[in-house]
Image (tube, grey):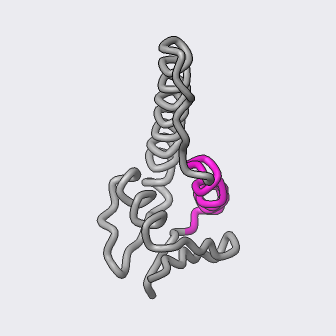
Amino acid sequence: MLFKFKSKAAGDVIMLEPSGRRVLQIIGKDPQAKGIILPEQMPAAAAALEAAIAKEEAEQRAMVEEAKAKGEAPPRFDAVTLRQRAVPFLDMLRRCEKAGQEIVWGV
């Protein structure tokens, strides 16, 4: 399944189901087949995504440092980070907030 996020103020953002579900859960939306993000909800959504990205990056750095301190090989992480997956969506949130347009999916 794909999540296709649409708005009149930005180009479509398409995500595979696991990534789209994760992003929606982070911003506090139920990852159902259909939904909407209103312009007044966008600042909080962007802040939640940015906090999740910072948390993931801090946790990964801590795990690498811990492994180095123990003399172990550093852990391997997903090739594509949350930051890389979320940046297009963050851009869409900012554009839509500025234009006062909602983001919808599944319609």
Give x and y (percent) for residue 58. 51, 27
Q: Which region is colored magenta?
A: 81-101
Q: Is residue 50 above or below residue 79?
A: above
- Residue visible at 57% across and 68% down in the picture: 101
Name the side, left or right, on which 96 lies relative to 70: right
Q: Is residue 4 above or below residue 65?
A: below
Residue 99 located within the stretch drawn in magenta: yes
The kind of secondary structure the magenta stretch mainly shows is helix
Say how many tags the image has. 0
Residue 25: image quadrant is: bottom left
Residue 23: image quadrant is: bottom left
Q: Is residue 19 above or below residue 16?
A: above
- Residue visible at 48% across and 63% down in the picture: 19
Q: Nearer the viewer, residue 7 or 80?
A: 80
Name the side, left or right, on which 50 lies relative to 44: right
- Residue visible at 38% across and 74% down in the picture: 35
Give x and y (percent) for residue 106. 43, 84
Q: Nearer the viewer, residue 90 or 2?
A: 2
Give x and y (percent) for residue 42. 49, 53
Residue 64 located within the stretch drawn in magenta: no
Q: Residue furthest bottom?
A: 107
